[in-house]
Amino acid sequence: MAVIHKEENFVVIELGGHTTKAVRDTTDINKLPTVQVRTRAGILKAEGEKGDDTDEPKKSAQGDASAKGDDDDEEEKASKKAEDGAAEQETQEPSYVFGSALEAADASSVDSIVDIIVDGHVRDWDALSAFLRFVLKELQIRISENICPMLFSIPPTWSKTDYECLAQIAFEHLNTPCIVITEQPLMAVFGNGSVNGLVVDFGHSSTTVTAVVDSCVMPSSVMQSSVAGIAVAEKLHELLASDRSVAEQLGESTDIPAEFVCALKESGLCGFELAPATATATADEDQQGKKDRVSETFEFDGKKYTLPKRLLQRAPEVLIRPETASAPVSTLMKQTVLSCEVDKRALLWESIHVVGGSSRFAGIKDALQLELETTVLPTSNIFANSQSREIRFGSIPDYFIGWRNCDHWAAFLGACIMAKVAMNDARHNVTRAEYNDSGPSVVHTKSY
């Protein structure tokens, strides 16, 4: 007899390259994620490594006072102690720290900081396992008494082996009764109330374009670019460093702190501005002069800065028109659409879904539409009627009151909706009994 799980125990976790979002209880679909944690881990130094520096002076002092005949014994003991310490470190599991604890940790106690997911791929599975245990702790779930079914929303670039590793972590490390694994592009389309769409995910370290046709992610259509949030931060840093007024406000400091640039990028002051196509050259010059005089006030670390608005508007443009050799996002979108069946291409152009943390810049949809209208539509007119004649963008329906102005979180909303549909459906979920009988590969037999 199938076990019916309560919606108040449903857990939804979206694994992002920069931020992981999670929520427990999907009874109210208008509920935003209650846990948002940076997807990175700090590896703490072993106790032996912390004590080596303080013990060294003592050893030196004792060596000066000891007899010369005891040198060989001391060297032998030291060598044996070093071998035992090395063997112990090899068998000892690393200690991790996450979230606010990582930010507050003393730099001398942290050996290294690892980004767990980079470009849509897991870099360290042990760190991911510890990270997910931390997320459950933040959701106030005791792993030893875990009765919460879990839905994982993952990047579309994961392999079958990645699916199996995640299933193994879920059942063996998190002690969950059942799981559902879904792909983020599909969840984004569902969150915007559609079943077809071209999903453009502007992430932190990469931009991913994926086609979803009839509720199925097209694996061969996935395109990636390295131009993403990091590129915007680098461009913003370059613009600020070259501006004389900003340099005067910073005083003697010649290097702009990365924290300053990151806070400014995420403050909401950066955005796109589209110039009217019918403006004359003189009007453009007058308008440019007005833009140069317009400024924004930004407060950081208790001090207010006056920044030219034109700089804040130029930085996000690299997402649409990169200055490097990387292909523009419009080219990636065109390649993705061309990889699908001819009769489905028009549907994709008429249902574009822009998601991801780096899609929050004001005016990004208008800028992307203008770029597509000047690069894609003119070339599509020479093809058959199956080609695009109009470009439309999807958004979260208005009846989701709690999700207004949160289009960049459409994938998480879709995952919450999917949890209500699939968590108690034996066709889609993987139970602990099935995992025990068939092993991690059982995840490939269940999908939506």
Image: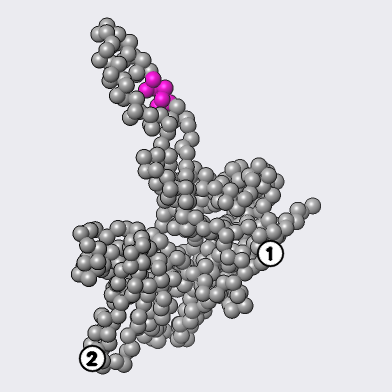
Q: Calculate the distance from the C-alpha at mark 2 to the C-alpha at mark 1.
A: 57 Å
The residue type indicated by label 1 comes to Thr
Q: Can the viewer see residue 347 in this picture? A: yes
What's the mark number on residue 281?
2
Residue 336 vs 370, above or below: the answer is above
Classify mark 1: residues with Cα within 10 Å, few (<14), some (14-19) or many (20+): some
Is residue 155 rendered magenta in the image? no
Label 2 crowding class (10 Å Cα cut-off): few <14, some 14-19, many 20+?
A: few
Task: Look at the picture and state if 117 lies above or below 264.
Answer: above
- The span shown in magenta is 81-87
Mark 2: amino acid: Ala
Q: Residue at x 33, y 10 (%)?
A: 73
Q: In front: 239, or 165?
A: 239
Res. 27 mark: 1
Q: Quadrant of residue 402?
A: bottom right
Residue 217 can be seen in this image? no
| Residue at the image position 36 percent from the left and 15 percent from the top | 77
Closer to the camera in the image, 195 or 226: 226
* Quarter of the image that includes the C terminus: bottom right
Which residue is most to the front? Answer: 302
Residue 72 in the figure: left or right of residue 388: left
Magenta region, mostly helix, strand or loop?
A: helix
* Membership of 84 in magenta stretch: yes
> In x, y percent, where is residue 289?
24, 84
User: Which residue: 31% across, 25% down?
Assistant: 56
Please say if 397 is above or below 169. Answer: below
Query: Which numbered dot is residue 223?
Result: none
Q: If you read the primary sequence from the N terminus, does the residue marked by circle 2 or circle 1 appear first?
A: 1
436 to 292, vertically: above or below: above
